[in-house]
Amino acid sequence: MRAYVMTEIRELTGSNMMAVVSSVLLQASYHLYYGWIGALSIAFPFSVFAIYYALSRRAVPIIVGHAVFDLYGLIRLM
């Protein structure tokens, strides 16, 4: 999702910054089930992922990173 949104926004606006900010806001918005503080707390890793994608245009490392975060959270629940 991040790669698609960022690519489209960058093409429409010509701005990597707008693409990064839009991506982070969109992703934080659909993590609001964590609550406002929870969604804001994961905005930092989202920002890192978005900046990485803006610079590299590579989505696979971000997918792997997200999977690692999810796996870590799952392990902590056990």
Image (cartoon, rainbow, N blue to C red):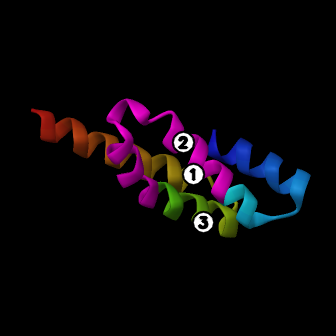
Principal SS element in the magenta part?
Answer: helix
Q: Which of marks 2 and 3 is nearer the N terminus?
A: 2
- Left or right of 33: which side holds 19? right
| Residue type for callout 1 | Val
Q: Indicate which disc residue 51 carries.
A: 3
In the image, what residue occupies the spot 24% across and 46% down? 72
In the image, residue 75 above or below residue 60: above
Q: Is mark 1 on a helix, strand or loop?
A: helix
Dot in front, 2 or 3: 2
**Tag 1 and tag 2, C-beta contact below 8 Å:** yes
Residue 42 lies within the magenta run: yes
Magenta segment, which residues?
Answer: 21-45
Q: Indicate which disc residue 55 carries.
A: none
Give the distance between the C-alpha atoms of the residues marked 1 and 2, in whole angstroms: 5 Å
Q: In the rendering, at what x and y percent does residue 9 appear?
A: 80, 50
- Left or right of 49: which side holds 4? right
Residue 60 lies within the magenta run: no
Give the distance between the C-alpha atoms of the residues marked 3 and 1, in whole angstroms: 10 Å
Q: In the rendering, at what x and y percent does residue 78 appear?
A: 9, 32
Residue for badge 2: 27
In the image, what residue occupies the spot 75% across and 65% down? 16
Quick one: which residue is furthest to the left in this view?
Answer: 78
